[in-house]
Amino acid sequence: MEVIRSLQNARVKSWCKLHDKKYRDKEHRFLIENEHLIMEAKDSGLLEALILLENESDHLNFEGPLFYVSEEVMKKLKMSQSLPKWMGVCRISKTDRPLGNKIILCDDVQDPGNLGTMIRSAYAFGFDSFIVSQASADLYNDKTVRSTQGALFHMNVCRGDIMDVVASLRSDGYKIYATALKNAKGLSEFKNEEKMVLIFGNEGRGVREELLAMADACIYIEMNRFESLNVAMAATICCYWFRS
Amino acid sequence: MEVIRSLQNARVKSWCKLHDKKYRDKEHRFLIENEHLIMEAKDSGLLEALILLENESDHLNFEGPLFYVSEEVMKKLKMSQSLPKWMGVCRISKTDRPLGNKIILCDDVQDPGNLGTMIRSAYAFGFDSFIVSQASADLYNDKTVRSTQGALFHMNVCRGDIMDVVASLRSDGYKIYATALKNAKGLSEFKNEEKMVLIFGNEGRGVREELLAMADACIYIEMNRFESLNVAMAATICCYWFRS
């Protein structure tokens, strides 16, 4: 068994570059690092290679390429505090359009933790696609990926021009609903639709006006005390309400 | 205007101690540090003193004691990355029992971010009290406080022996509902009750068996794909469902 020990090794250098969004986008690859995520990636067929600490005998039943590395190399590769036993190199699946009947759209959601939680909820409650605007947080940021708890590997996720996407879905007969605080109806007045799009907005400004103007209706979440909820919480409630 | 510049100043030393849970518990005080939180604390009457960066002319209309400090002192006191203009010293309001008709109970919720989000949701949807078990995360941890977005200052929150609390509420005629994955009914089958308790469990093991045994019914959140949600998201959905 060969162990990679040099930080100058070409593979190590190319993996390290995946810490950077620019390279993830270019290489269509990203790193993950906990056992649960690795198993989910493996099951979805998106795990390309497994990186293991030398002396780690369990290769998680992965049948693709295995790379053993020294502790020093693993420290260089890792993204969290503790030293992982395994890291995975995953492929970004190249979809570029919404699929299915129930779609979530994020208009410039900035926080990776929010984005990941929204993907987790969308998946849990039976949504099919998750589309983010160009200025939203990165889908393959370590924090986003961890917050999805693996849901990322099982959903159609993509980034696109959000105005074009909405216009296209609208002409395909989808109901378009956007969350908003003004000119909106309470969530509990809505019924489930077969083909629908739910739009959530930026943490600061909400959904942009041009998108609100394209919506069939706006939704607010009935509360008696606070004016707004965190976007991930709002999305979770809406996904539950419109669950399949 | 006197400016405190010494890290050895007695006040500075006593404020710094409040970074530690042990001292927060002993002194019944905690620190906060963003403008929004400080305004909420002020409105609730729990702000005891305002600490300002020297040269800061805006004292946020606070009429209590003002303490101006040097940048070096503020750096020592702050809890987040950036240098705040203001910090607040808050009193912990000493309630030790549930009040009102709608109560959330946390059985060893470990993550401060989860705890804070749950307090925010409980408050937003009209719950009256928020009780945590002895082994739950600290209610006055900086991350908890920030995640509540100020809701902490407007709710009856306390820590107690959770078994005693449930037994007492049960004999007072409250309906007791616990979240669980087994032997549970879907959330949408439940109707709102005038006097109710919702119990949420530890991130790893859920609600302990002894508490499940005391519940009138167990609730699961209907999903078609995942086995469990993050506890903060589960609580947010339930609080919405049972909102006042």
Image (spheres, coloured by chain):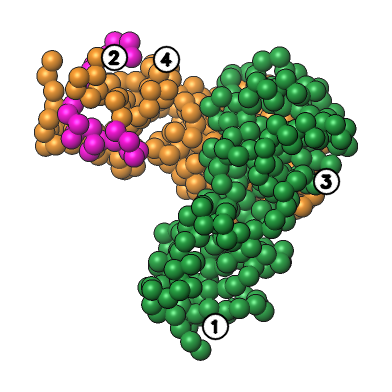
Chain colours: A orange, B green
Q: Are marks 4 and 2 on the same chain?
A: yes
Q: Is residue A64 visible?
A: yes
Label 1: chain letter: B
Distance, label 4 to label 3, CA atoms, is 48 Å
Distance, label 4 to label 2, CA atoms, is 17 Å
Q: Residue at x 49, y 66 (%)?
A: B15
Q: Are marks 2 and 1 on the same chain?
A: no
Q: Which residues are magenta?
A: A59-83
Q: Which residue is mark 4?
A: A43
Q: What number is the disc on residue B225?
A: none
Q: Residue at x 68, y 22 (%)?
A: B210
Label 4: chain letter: A
Q: Which residue is mark 1?
A: B57
Q: Is residue B126 above or below residue A188?
A: below
Label 3: chain letter: B
Q: Which residue is mark 3?
A: B100
Mark 2: which amino acid? Asp
Q: Which one is closest to the eye, mark 4 or mark 3?
A: 3
Q: What number is the disc on residue A58?
A: 2
On the image, the x and y values in percent for residue A31 come to 32, 31
On the image, the x and y values in percent for residue B84 come to 48, 68
Which of disc 3 and disc 1 is earlier in sequence?
Answer: 1
Mark 4: which amino acid? Asp
